[in-house]
Amino acid sequence: MILHYLDFHAYSFRKKHASFLIKLPIAKDTWLFNCTEGSQFNFLNQGLKINNLSKIIIPDLHTTSISGLLGLLSTLNLVGRIKSLHIYAPVDIKYYLDLGKKYSRTNFSYVLYIHVLRTGLIVNQYGYRIYALKLSGYYEFLIVQSEQYGTFYLSKAKYSNLEPGPIYGKLKKGFSFIKPDGSILDGSNFTSSNSLGSQVSFIFSYFYRKKVFKVLGVNNFTLFF
């Protein structure tokens, strides 16, 4: 997982409502949080592949949070996007998009799915889970990355005369087996070390909020809108 501010002029505590993204190299997916003015320009200017964008997550319907949304969606349409796009936002985002399309007389060539934000789990994909928490008129987010299994050493398995099959997957997950001769196959001997998961919070501000300090203590990273 790669965390990256889309607006490279945005820094913590200096600018509210910044756009940032999560890149998933294995899945070639990009998830965008907030869609501020000029988002499509920033994608192109920073050499990012705009067509890899699969999710847009918007915490509120403040002007600064959605000012770049219609422009970004139109740019995707112009580049000939075919695959669907998912937007997670408060319920009234649908009316905003409908009015925008009507005013500009534009229809998108791809399917646009709208997911209404609610407190709880909103995304569970590729070993990542995103939770939304509704506060005073906006949402904050927590993303949890599951522990990743280590690389399976195929050469060691072949050296131990193990035939390819379901046992490979079990050994990769750390299971152990007793062979007929009484020897033990320990899964940890056939894989590299597991990669620990991570937890990232996306919040507006930590000022005057005691509960946020408790969350920050267990996070690997904290990003501010």
Image: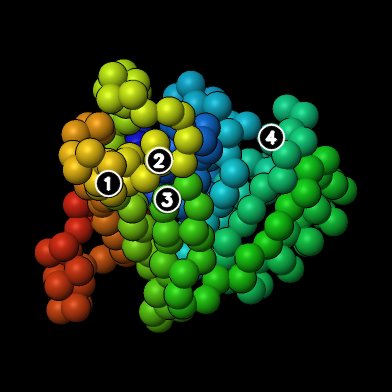
Sooner in the amino-acid sequence: mark 3 or mark 4: 4
Q: Which structural element holds mark 1?
A: strand
Res. 47 visible in picture: yes
Q: Which structural element holds mark 4?
A: helix
| Image-based side of 141 in relation to 183, left or right | right
Labels 2, 4: front one:
2
Q: CA distance from mark 2 to mark 3?
A: 22 Å
The residue that disc 1 covers is 177
Where in the figure is residue 147, as x and y percent of width and height? 29, 49
Sooner in the amino-acid sequence: mark 2 or mark 4: 4
The residue that disc 4 covers is 75
For the point 28% across and 25% down, the residue is 160
| Marks 1 and 3 close (CB-CB < 8 Å) | no
Q: CA distance from mark 4 to mark 1?
A: 55 Å
Labels 3, 4: front one:
3
The residue that disc 3 covers is 127
